[in-house]
Amino acid sequence: MFLHQLITLSAVTVDKPTGVLGALATGAEDFIKVFNKGGTVLLSLMGGILPTLIVLLTAVNALVRIIGAERIENLGKAASRPGLQWYPVRYIILPFVAVFVLTNPMAYTMGRFLPERFKPAFYDSAVSFVHPILGIFPHANPGELFVYLGIATGIKELGFGLGDLAIRYLLVGLVVIFIRGIVTERITARMMAKAERSA
Amino acid sequence: MEGFTNLIVRIGRGVGGVVGTLYQAGRDSVDTVIRNVIPFMAFISFIIGLILTTGIGNWIAKGLKGSASSLPGLLLISIVCAIPILSPLLGPGAVIAQIVGTLLGVEIGKGNIPAQYSLPALFAINPQVGCDFIPVGLALGEAEPETVEIGVPAVLFSRVITGPLSVVIAYFASFGLYHTSK
């Protein structure tokens, strides 16, 4: 009996408030609606991505600690050699390994093994890779995850898998940093020659 | 007997080392998540809430829909982001790229922008990556001051070429991505 009363009570609808107070009330509801929606989004982000991210970060951080940052120094030395066959090492392999192992921003310290004329190009190449790597290895730059994740969330909303986008982002990223390295190296060389002539 | 004790000590030390490494790795990752990831998630959630509940979303959708769902439009975005004066201003913390990425994500989720444009869009919103950080990045690589002086404009000019180029490459690489065969 009591339960029945409760149900009928809750079924009663109230007229929408009118007048100045009514407008204020509607305003208040709209105001809080923004944050309710935001809260729902936050919860779905934290529930959906964070647990995986924390476990993945832990595993990769441990791996990087076991490998040891000092071991990739030999690669840096190899990448400083002149010659065409070292271009892919300098602007694909070295940036990839540096960003993966040292992460943003310590990856740029690998530039110290290169001669001065390659340094701007290496920086350009490495810094351009801190986002394409995020789809598969988010540990490399977790503070800027949403460059990728913002768009990826939309794809997820449509019910599509993220693997295809993540791997293509990574691969196209590698092509782009290679081109960027070469272009910047050429521009640097030209500007250095010009500065030398005027000096 | 001594050999046996040594073995046990060595195993103990090894296991302790591995567990310690894993534990420290866990501590590092939780630290990163709390200090870098969750604050940004909170900020992004607020923006998404604002977009979805107010009319701002429709207004942005109209603006972005035209430019983000065609190759020329995406090229235009990348050229603007790569302008040598603008690119260092748009760079810091990749905040702009993250916000625009989130806005595009919302529109992709609503079906206003085709899903296969997600790949070129990722490059179109980001030709300015690291443009604010060139002197610091070069200093981390122990570059001479003369190199920094030349390196900053060299990278900025390079982006004018490689920014739009990256969008074109990504556009061609996106064929077959999220293709619906109907």
Image (tube, coloured by chain):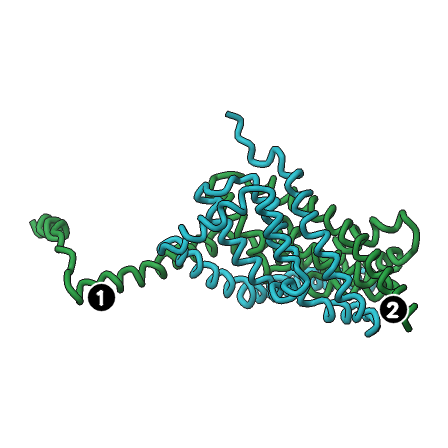
Q: Residue at x 48, y 59 (%)?
A: B44
**Where residue A36 sits: x, y (%)?**
34, 59
Q: Nearer the viewer, residue A35 or A64?
A: A35
Give neighbour class at mark 1: few <14, some 14-19, many 20+ (Cα, 10 Å): few
- Residue position marked by numbered label 2 in the rendering: A195
**The residue under label 2 is which amino acid type?**
Ala
Q: Position of residue A199 (x, y in %)?
A: 91, 73
What residue does disc 1 label? A24
Q: Residue at x 23, y 61 (%)?
A: A26
Q: Quadrant of residue B149?
A: bottom right
Q: Colour of chain B?
A: cyan
**Looking at the rendered structure, which numbered label has been put on residue B31?**
none
Going 66% across and 52% down the picture, which residue do you hit? A133
Q: Is residue B85 above or below residue B101?
A: below
Badge 1 element: helix
Please name the color used to draw chain A.
green
Question: Please, is residue B182 above or below residue B169 in the view?
Answer: above
Nearer the viewer's eye, disc 2 or disc 1? 2
